[in-house]
Amino acid sequence: MKKLVVLLAALAFTSIYAQDQQMPKQIKYTAHNKGKVYFFWGGNRDSYTKSDIHFKGDNYDFTVSNAIADDKPKGWHVDYINPSRMTIPQTNFRIGYFINDHYNISIGLEHMKYVMRQDQIANVTGNVNLPSTDAGSMYNGTYNNTPVNFYNNYIDYDHGTPFPFLTFEHTDGLNYVNTEISRVDDFSKIFGITNTDVFQVNLTEGVGGGFLYPKTNAQILGYKRHDSFHVSGYGVSAKVGLNLTFFKHYFIQGELKGGYINMPDIRTTAITNDTASQHFMFLERVVSFGGIFIL
């Protein structure tokens, strides 16, 4: 009897082992990306190269050389998740789709902010010839690489006089609407991580391009302050990032992105003939939170 039990047990074990060998091993969710959709929301900090900004209208034509500008950070703030105030901080939104295990295509909005410094002296070249009845005629004259102290000319343009020579910013914002193609590689093994469904480390790189849709806040030579959205130009960019995925679906991603922006058609006043143009390089640092799911 004992021999029969042992024999049956051995046969059962052999049968189970054989079936196990024939059945496919369970594939980890994070082993493949094809067909997955991801999205993220985050914030950014930005740096810009100096820029020559050309202003042109019916009665003026001048260039501010090597203008310095900064971003306008808000820091850690509830506005990042407050639906009614999400556009106030510098924010990033992106949604993408994996066309295979390594490559994805995406579309995103990068809401940066660009503020020309008022506490700077910059050289101005060109001419201003406003009618003498205009308040801004105080700045009439020919400028030949002439230093202008923007701080001394700056005043609260909503409440004060005289008017400033110039205030200029894209603060709602320097909106870069773009598409990207990116590659993602799992680097978990380098760190000894075996169960990537619990924690996964990915490296991502990408290139992209799109258009600039800034809301430019400007006041020039006493003209009424103008602040409206307008498609003003284009941008191209490249990025590298680190993605940390938790429990298959949730991730934190940090990115370093650099690019070039060219805006030849910036609205500056309510007069359609009044425009500005500029181009510059930017460096963007992004931290975002998101999710990844199979459709």
Image (cartoon, grey):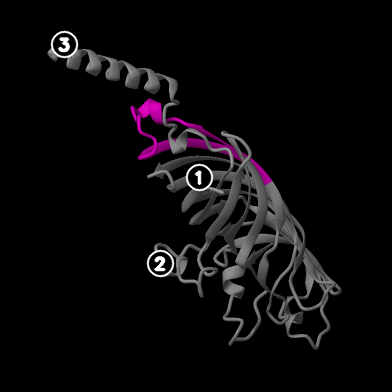
Marks 3/1: CA–CA distance: 66 Å
| Mark 2 lies on residue | 77
The quadrant of the picture occupied by the N terminus is: top left
How far, Cα to Cα, is label 3 from label 2?
Answer: 74 Å
Residue, x 42% and y 27% (percent of image)?
A: 25
x%, y% of residue 79?
45, 69
Q: Earlier in the sequence, mark 3 or mark 1?
A: 3
Q: What residue type is disc 2 on?
A: His
Kindly report which numbered mark, 3 or 2, lies closer to the viewer in this rendering.
3
Magenta stretch encompasses residue 31: no
Q: Which residue is mark 1?
A: 255
Q: Rate crowding at label 3 as few (under 14), some (14 to 19) or many (20 or more) other CA atoms within 10 Å.
A: few
Q: Is residue 294 left or right of residue 7?
A: right
What residue do we see at 73% from left, 57% from top?
Answer: 278
Q: For the residue marked with disc 1, what is the amino acid?
A: Glu
Residue placed furthest toward the left:
2
CA gap, disc 2 and disc 1: 20 Å
Whether pointer 3 and pointer 1 mark residues with C-beta atoms closer than 8 Å, the reply is: no
Residue closer to the observer: 239 or 138: 239
Q: Identify the element where label 2 is drawn.
A: loop
Give the vertical position of 233 relative to 191 (above or below).
Answer: below
- Pick out the residue farthest to the top: 3
Q: At which x and y percent is residue 100?
A: 61, 35
Is residue 160 rendered to the left or right of residue 8?
right
Q: Decide which of tag 3 and tag 2 comes sooner along the chain.
A: 3
User: Magenta stretch?
Assistant: 182-208
Indicate which label's residue lies in the foreground, 3 or 1. Answer: 3
Residue 287 seen by the camera = no
State the image coordinates of residue 261 (x, y, percent, origin top left). 69, 51
